[in-house]
Amino acid sequence: MKVKGMLLSSLVFLCSCTGQPTVNIVDVGYQRAEQQLVSQLKVIPEPEAYPRTVDKDGNLKATHKNDWTEGFYPGCMWYLYEYSGKESWKEEAVKWTEALEPLKKLTNHHDIGFLLYCSFGNGYRLTGDERYKDVLIEAANSLCTRFTETTGCIESWNYRKAWNGVDEWFYPVIIDNMMNLELLYFASKVTGNPFYADIANTHAETTLKNHFRKDYSCYHVINYDETTGNVLHKGTSQGFSDNSAWARGQAWAIYGYTMAYRETQRPEYLEVAVRAADFWLTHTNLPEDKVPYWDFNAGQEGFVPDWNYDPTNFQKIPRDASAAAITASALIELSQYIEDNGRYFKEAENILQSLSSPSYLAEAGTNSNFVLKHSVGSIPHGQEIDVPIVYADYYYLEALLRYNEFMKNKTT
C-alpha cells in the first residue's frame, strides 16, 4: 500500500469500460433527487416529522425526532443546495436542521453524530453559522458521556439481550459507531481541545482491536464487560449471523476508518480502511453490479442465525443500496489517500453508475418520493426490507458530490 503525498493527486477519466463517455451520473442523480424532494416536501411541509422509509403498504413513513435517521433528511437538502446553489434549498435545509437543535442534549444512545453532524455539520460547513458550531460542540459533549476509560469505547446502545434471548449485552458497541467520531474530531478542531479527539481515537483503536476478523470483515456488535472492559461476546443484531459479514456494517467500517485517517493521518486507520475495502471488493458473493446483498453470507452454509430465519421467505436475497452508497462515498475519499492506479475510484464509479440506473434510481413521482430503491434496514427485526431509506439517499448524494469534485479537480 503506497500512501499518496497529497489530496486528489490521482486523475481518473469519466469513461465506461469500453472507453466511451458515460452519462453524467451526477446530473442524473441530482435532477431526480430535486424532483423527489420537492414532491416529498408537499406531503410533509414542516419539520414535525422526518421522512425515513415506507410502510408495508408503500406509504411514506416518518419519525418524530425520536430515532437515529432524522439528520439525513436536512443533510440531503444541504447537498441539494451545495450542488444547485439554489437559495430555496438552503432555506429548507435551515428550517429542517434547526428543528433538530433540542437533540444536542441527547445522551441515551450514540447516534447523535448521525442526527446532528449530517444536518448541523453540513450547515456549518456551507454557511459558517457560529450557532451551528455551538450546537455541534454541545452534541459532542453529550456523545462523550457514553464513553468509559474501562472499555475504551463509546457505548452504542443501552442494555439489551442478543437474538438468542440468552446472551446479555451489557455494554454493546456497534461498528456503526465509528461514523459518530467525526463529530468528536470536529469538536477538537474548532475548540482546540484534544479531549474529544482523544476519545475518538481511543474508540477507534479499541474497535480496530476487537471488531475485525483476520480477513477484515467485521462483527456488528461487541459486548463488553463494563466493569473490566473485557470482551464478552461478538455477534450481530442486523446481520445474518454472528460470524457473517453484514454489508452495511462493512460499509460503516470502510467509511469510518477512512474518515478517521483523514482526521488523524494515523497509518493504522488507513490500513484497516484499505483491508476492509478489499474484503468488500474481492468478495466472491459481490454481485456484478457492485450493489451487495444485505449480508455477504446470507443463507450460506456455515452461517447459522439466532433470529427466526425462514429460508423460504428469501428465495431472492435482498440487495442493500444503502450499503452500496455508503461504500461508494468512502471509496472516493479512500482513493485520494493511496496510490492504487484509480482502482477504488473506478469501483466507486461503477457503484454509482448502478445506483443511477433504472434498477435503483426511482422514477419521478414513485417510491414515496425517495431517490433510491432497494435498501434494507434490518431483516432480523422484520423491518425495512427492500424499501427506500433516507440514509441511502443521503450517502448517494454525498458520493455524487465527491465524485463531481474529483472530476472537476481532474480538469483544473
Image: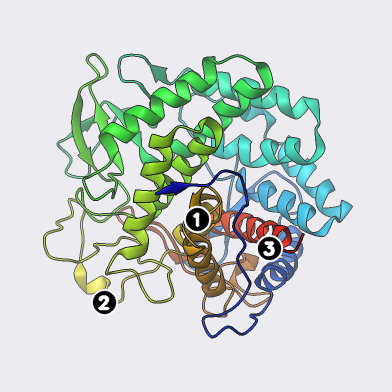
Instruction: Identify the image's colour scheme: rainbow, by chain, secondary structure or one colour.
Output: rainbow
Q: Residue 331: which disc?
A: 1
Task: Tell me how far mark 2 sits from mark 1, CA to CA.
Answer: 31 Å
Above or below, comparing residue 60 to residue 148 in the picture: below
Q: In the image, is 343 to the left or to the right of 24?
A: left
Note whether 247 is above or below 17 in the view shown: above
Q: Say if residue 158 shows up in the picture.
A: no
The picture quadrant where one finds residue 313 is: bottom left
Q: Quadrant of residue 133?
A: top right
Going from the N terminus, do you reach mark 2 or mark 3 first? 2
Find numbered disc 3 in the image and state the secondary structure of the residue it sits on: helix
Decide: few, some or many residues near mark 2? Use Cα within 10 Å; few <14, some 14-19, many ≥20.
few
Tell which of 285 and 239 is nearer to you: 285
Residue located beneath label 3 in the image: 407
Q: Position of residue 280 (x, y in %)?
A: 35, 59
Marks 2, 1: nearer the viewer: 1
For this view, does 355 lie left or right of residue 43? left
Residue 175, placed above or below residue 396: above
Q: Please provide percent x and percent y for residue 352.
A: 55, 68
For disc 2, the marked residue is 315
Q: Which mark is residue 170?
A: none
In the image, what residue type sits under mark 2? Gln
Secondary structure at badge 2 equals loop
- Tag 1: amino acid: Leu
- Would you call the spot at circle 1 few (<14 residues within 10 Å), some (14-19), or many (20 or more)? many
